Amino acid sequence: MADQKNAELGKVEEKKRKTSPGEFFSQVKAETNKIVWPTREETVRTAIFVFIFMMILSIFFLGIDSLFGAIVRGAISLLQ
């Protein structure tokens, strides 16, 4: 059983073809040409969205942190 698996594995390895460096780079160039880059307007719009979302989240976490800080300070003052 193990010999059969090793034989099958050897057949699979024989079927793999080596890619020459020139062929590899031509394939990379072909795949690179398929990339659709965002326009300047899309990039600016996305950057503005990220900035606004970052500000909203920072204000939210500032509020949560302040709330928990007040709760902890209140609990510590009760213990003293």
Image: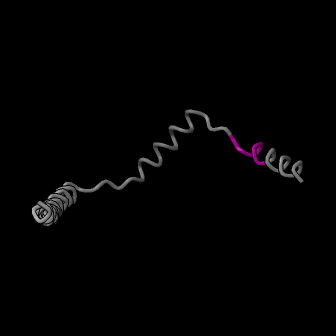
Compared to residue 2, the image places residue 50 above or below, namely: below
Q: Main secondary structure of the magenta part?
A: helix
Quadrant for the N terminus in the image: bottom right
Q: Could you tell me residue 56's position as x and y percent?
A: 14, 65
Occupied quadrant, residue 23: top right
Residue 75 horizontal/vertical position (percent): 15, 65
Could you say which quadrant of the image residue 60 lies in? bottom left
Whether 14 is drawn above or below 73: the answer is above
Residue 25 lies, with reference to residue 3, above or below; the image says: above
Residue displayed at 9% across by 62% down: 77
In this rendering, would 60 be left or right of 14? left
Q: Find the residue positioned furthest to the front.
A: 80
Dividing the image into 4 quarters, which one contains the C terminus?
bottom left
Q: Looking at this view, is 19 or 67 the one in front?
A: 67
The picture places residue 50, in percent across and down from the top left corner, at 19, 59
Q: How many marks?
A: 0
Q: Is residue 13 magenta?
A: yes
Looking at this view, name the residue that lies furthest to the top: 21
Residue found 71% across the figure and 44% down from its top: 16
- Residue interval drawn in magenta: 12-17
**Residue 72 or residue 67, whichever sits in front:** 72
Asked if residue 54 can be seen in this view, the reply is yes
**Of 73 and 47, the residue lying toward us:** 73
Residue 54 magenta-drawn?
no
Q: Position of residue 71 (x, y in %)?
A: 14, 66
Colour scheme shown: one colour
Judge whether residue 52 can be spotted in this image.
no
Residue in the image at 52% along x and 44% along y? 27
In the rendered structure, the answer to whether residue 59 lies left or right of residue 37 reads: left
Q: Which residue is painted at 55% across and 34% down in the image?
A: 22
